[in-house]
Image (cartoon, rainbow, N blue to C red):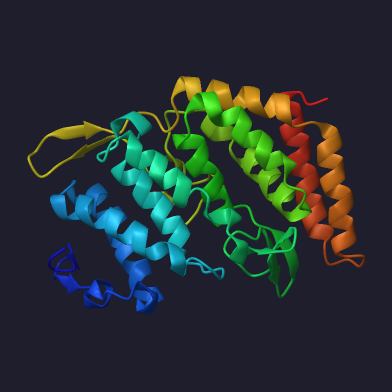
Amino acid sequence: MGEAWFMGDERRMFDALMAPDVSAWPVDEIEQALSESSSGPVCFGHMREWSEWFPYLLHASLEHVGPWSPASIFGGLVTNMMVHCPQRTSSRYGEKFVDDVLATLGQLPMAARFWSGDHLATRTAFQPLQRWPVGVRLADDGDLHAAFWLVAKYLHPDNIEDWLGSVVEIDDPAWGAGLVCWLAQAGPALDDPVSWPGSDEARQGAWSGSHILRGGKIADEDGVEFDCGPFLEPGRVAALSAAVARVLDRRRLDEWRQRLLLLGRDESLDAVLGTYDTHCAAVSKRYRLS
């Protein structure tokens, strides 16, 4: 790969990320490298270095996704994907690369290390129930949102209903609550599919680095402008909306709520249930669930 460096006022070297044993890579250095490899093209335009480093970091960083972290490796990888491959059909690496990403990064939430039996493990990247000093809350952002957006943005529209159906079948109330939260937060993106996540400061459902995803035109090192296009193509919006209406119903929403009640019989989940009920109402209304 040559030198490990990224753009800035001064060259910063990421020598540790050149070590053959990727398990020894420092997590904070991976997070910083991912931040720079996604923000660099947006700030300075695409350069060969950015395009070469993203697949390298993607492959080597997967095993480091684990405990919850505010500077998420998973979120950084998703953000990089959307910077370097703004559309499935306009990937700098071809559609086969997009399918490979879906089969690896996209499948990562189902890895055994994130589950304890049939339930999402606590304090891991994709767990949407977060314990704070003031109690437990349902995360309105984070890695699970990024995971759902990754698949919704890049999976072939013909396969979206099958994918969403498999997501709904997962019998874990925390997972279900996270899905409902994502669907509720996704509303603005479906209403304005041209607008990218970073274009509306008030939009929720964010993840690490998503604030830089503003779409528009990005120049490359040869001065040629590349139009990122809409965040979601019209056919993708239609496929996702139709899939939700067909695979989700109020019975399933009620099942998840009843099982959430079993997770905490005191007042520790009151805030979670309140947020969940609000999101269920929004999703039921939008998709006219029966």
Can residue 37 be seen in this snapshot?
yes
Q: Is residue 283 or residue 84 the one in the foreground? A: 84
Q: Is residue 210 or residue 107 the one in the foreground? A: 107
Asked if residue 215 lies left or right of residue 200, the reply is left
Q: Is residue 37 or residue 168 the one in the foreground? A: 168
Can residue 142 be seen in this snapshot?
no
Measured as percent of width and height from the top left, residue 80 is found at 35, 51
Quadrant where the C terminus is found in the figure: top right
Task: Identify the residue at image location x=62%, y=52%.
Answer: 140
Q: Residue furthest right?
A: 265
Classify 203 as above or below 289.
below
Asked if residue 114 lies left or right of residue 95, the reply is right
Quadrant where the N terminus is found in the figure: bottom left
Task: Identify the residue at image location x=89%, y=57%.
Answer: 261
Asked if residue 40 lies left or right of residue 61, the reply is left
Measured as percent of width and height from the top left, residue 55 is found at 29, 53
Measured as percent of width and height from the top left, residue 70 is found at 50, 67
Residue 76 quadrant: bottom left
Residue 263 quadrant: bottom right
Task: Identify the residue at image location x=41%, y=46%.
Answer: 101
Q: How many marks?
A: 0
Task: Identify the residue at image location x=60%, y=59%.
Answer: 126
